[in-house]
Image (cartoon, rainbow, N blue to C red):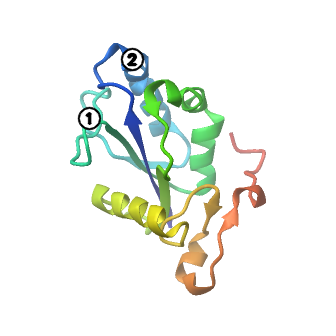
Amino acid sequence: MHLAQLNVARLRAPIDSPTLAEFVANLEPINKLSDAAPGFVWRLKESEEDPTLTVRHDYGDDLLINFSVWESRETLWNFVYKSRHLEFLRRRREWFRHMAEPYTVMWWIPQGVIPTLAEGMERLARLREHGPTPHAFTFRDFYEPAEVAGEATATPRHISSWVPSPQTT
């Protein structure tokens, strides 16, 4: 199984504004970093030719979408929190509005399957409506692949019960 993840953010200003210039200038290097990260499988891109283009969609002009697939929770965690990406994650409030509702969701998919954006948005809506379940969860309340199959008895593992192994970076 592979781990699909979708996260969304509401822009503070139009993508081509001076407010977001530094963010946009770093899209290419951060996307290259993710694409080369151990465990990276796939990322939704608007263009192969222009790495600064953001994904076009029908969910609102101010909504920025990041959608990717990873080999495991650990490989996604390492990219998000143990790479240069963290530097930009810490600055997200400069570029994005605060969201009171969940803005990221994860779920397990069979290897070789590429999820659709509609599926990702549906999973996010499910998480917002029902909280974490084996079909829509977060790093904080995470379900292992085996728990998805036995979802009737599954309980989420809180982030404090999982620490990545020290040898992964």
Q: Is residue 3 visible?
A: no
Secondary structure beneath disc 1? loop
Residue sitting at 76 percent across and 56 percent down? 160
Q: Quadrant of residue 140?
A: bottom right
* Residue that numbered label 2 is attached to: 19
Q: Earlier in the sequence, mark 1 or mark 2?
A: 2
Tell me which residue sits at (38%, 20%) in the image: 20
- Tell me if residue 59 comes above or below residue 83 in the rendering: below
Q: Name the amino acid type tagged 2.
A: Thr
Decide which of 118, 84 is in the foreground and name it: 118
Question: Residue 148 at x, y = what percent?
Answer: 54, 76
Tell me the residue that label 1 is attached to. Answer: 48
Q: Residue at x 49, y 52 (%)?
A: 101
Residue 79, percent from left and from top: 58, 40
Q: Which of the two discs, 1 and 2, sits closer to the camera?
A: 2
**In-front residue for pair 47/161:** 161
32 vs 59, left or right, is: right
The residues tagged by marks 1 and 2 sit, at their Cα atoms, a distance apart of 25 Å
* Residue at the image position 39 percent from the left and 28 percent from the top: 12
Say if residue 102 shows up in the picture.
yes
- The spot of residue 88 in percent (x, y) is 54, 27
Left or right of 156? Residue 161 is right
Report the disc number at residue 128: none
